[in-house]
């Protein structure tokens, strides 16, 4: 590890001053920007009951898809067909979008 730290310090010293100066202002500007919370974080804080309802619906749908997948596999159905059927249940919009 000592060898790596020496190499890093020498490569930084070899950089031109203009290149080092161009990197410094962008690094200083990044901490000042605040990131907005993502959609789900805002949903949980602003509308917790609606978020709980959405999560419950998603969980029920995925649970049903897993049960269907298991039933099809136990019945001896082809794995790819069973998986396609389960994915259509779990993610219905993706299946409709596909031609």
Image (cartoon, grey):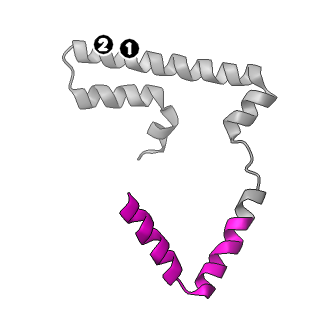
Above-or-below relation of 58 to 13: above
User: In the figure, is residue 89 to the left or right of 27?
Assistant: left
Q: Residue under circle 2?
A: 71
Identify which residue is drawn at 70% across, 25% down: 51
User: In the figure, is residue 53 to the left or right of 92?
Assistant: right
Q: How many marks?
A: 2
User: In the figure, is residue 45 to the left or right of 99?
Assistant: right
State if disc 2 and disc 1 touch (CB < 8 Å).
Answer: yes
Question: How far, Cα to Cα, is label 1 from label 2?
Answer: 6 Å
Label 1 sits on a secondary structure element that is helix
In front here: 41 or 14? 14
Query: Which region of the structure is painted magenta?
Result: 1-28
Report the magenta stretch's main SS: helix
Residue 74 position, x and y percent, is: 23, 12
Identify which residue is drawn at 60% across, 17% down: 56
Residue 24 within the magenta-colored segment of the rendering:
yes
Identify which residue is drawn at 27% across, 29% down: 81
Residue 58 position, x and y percent, is: 56, 23
Identify which residue is drawn at 46% across, 76% down: 10
The numbered mark at residue 20 is none
Q: Residue under circle 1?
A: 67
């Amino acid at each position: 590890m000592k060898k790596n730290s020496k190499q890093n310090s020498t490569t930084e010293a070899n950089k031109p001053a203009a290149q080092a100066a161009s990197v410094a202002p962008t690094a200083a500007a990044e901490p000042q920007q605040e990131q907005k919370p993502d959609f789900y974080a805002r949903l949980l804080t602003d509308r917790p009951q609606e978020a709980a309802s959405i999560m419950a619906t998603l969980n029920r749908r995925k649970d049903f898809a897993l049960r269907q997948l298991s039933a099809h596999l136990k019945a001896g159905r082809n794995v790819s067909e069973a998986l396609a059927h389960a994915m259509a249940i779990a993610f219905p919009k993706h299946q409709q979008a596909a031609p």
